[in-house]
Amino acid sequence: MATIGFIGLGNMGLPMAQNLLKAGHKVQGFDVTKAQADALVASGGTAAPSVKAAVTGAEVIVTMLPAGQHVREVYLGPDGVLAAAGPGTLLIDSSTIDVDSARAVAAAADGKGLPMLDAPVSGGTGGAQAGTLTFMVGGSDQAFARAKPFLEKMGKTIVHAGGAGNGQAAKICNNMILGVSMIAVSEAFVLAEKLGLDAQKLFDISSKSSGQCWSMTAYCPVPGPVATSPANRDYQAGFTAAMMLKDLKLAQDAAKSAGAATPLGADAADLYGRYVESGEGPRDFSGIIRFLRDR
Ligand code: NAD
C-alpha cells in the first residue's frame, strides 16, 4: 500500500481521498480550510499542516484545487510540491484548469525529473463518493500506467487522452458540449410551453428521437420526466452554474489561443455569464431554463 499526499479536500477531493483510504492506502491530506482536513482524519487519514508536509514521504501526490492559479501556487511555490517531492514521486492534478497552466506545471515537473499527469474528472460529487468518476488523463505512457491503479480506486472509466494537457482539453471540450446542449434542450422546453405542447410529451418524443442527448435524458431541465434531475429539487446543485461558467470560459480561452471557431460555445459562455450575474451562480446549471423562460 502507498503513502499518498492529497491536497485540496473540498466537495470532490475529500470523497476521492476517502476512497483511497478505503482501498487501504495511507493518505496525508492538506487543505487551507482546517475543517476539511479534520473530516479526512475522521475517516482514518492524517492532517498535514502544509503542502510540504503532505508531500514529504509520499510516493504519489493528488491535487484537487479550484482553478489554475491555485495549481500553479501549490506546485510551483517556494514550499510547493515540486520543491518538496522526493525523486520519482508521481504527481496527479485532478483539478479542472486551463490547458496552458496544466502544460506549464507539467513542464516544470519534467524539468525536475518528476512524472506528472493532468487527470480532470467528470461525474460530480455523487461520482466522487461512489468511486465512479471518469478520469481524462494527459501525460506519458509510463506515468499513466503507474497512476491507473490509484485512479481506479476513485473512478470507473480511466481514459488516456494523450500528452500533457490533453486531459484538460478533453474536459473542456466535453463540458462545452454539455453547456451548449443544456441551453438547446432548455430552449426547446420553453418553446414547447409557448406552443401549448406538454413537457412530458416533448420528453417522450425527443428522448427517443434525434433530439436525444444527456441533457434531455439524464438531466432533464424540467421537473417530472427524470426523477433524479435537479429540476425536481428547485435546481439545487449538482453542478453549479458558476462551475459551468468557469469551464465555458476555459473553453473560450483555449479556442482563442488555438484559433478554433466555437460560436455556440461563445454564446453559451455569454448566457451562463448573465445567468450567474443574476445571482444564480450556486444554483444547478440546468436552472438556466428559468432564466431563458423569463427573458
Ligand atoms: P471545492 O471548492 O469544494 O474544493 C477545493 C478545495 O481546495 C477547498 O476545500 C479549498 O479550501 C482547497 N484549497 C484552495 N486553495 C488551496 C491551497 N492553496 N492549498 C490547499 N487547499 C486549497 O471545489 P470542488 O467542487 O471540490 O472542485 C475541485 C475541482 O474539481 C475544480 O477544479 C472543479 O472545477 C472540479 N470539478 C468539480 C466538480 C463538481 O461537481 N463539484 C465536478 C468535476 C470537476
Image: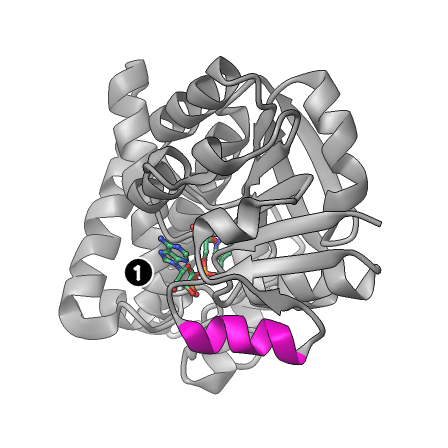
Amino acid at the residue labelled 1: Ala
Q: Is residue 41 left or right of residue 288?
A: right
Left or right position of 56 against 24: left
Q: To which residue does mark 1 refer?
A: 242
- Looking at the image, which is closer to me, 76 or 20? 76
Using residue 128 as the reference point, say whether residue 229 is left or right of it.
left
- Residue 111: image location, x then y, percent: 47, 14
Does residue 70 sit above or below 108 in this rendering? below
Magenta-colored segment: predominant secondary structure: helix
In front here: 181 or 27? 27
Which residue is drawn at the image coordinates 75% and 63% (left, top)? Answer: 21
- The range drawn in magenta is 34-42
Please name the residue shown 57% across and 77% down the image.
39
Q: How many marks?
A: 1
Res 139 visible: yes
Residue that appears at 40% across and 59% down: 188
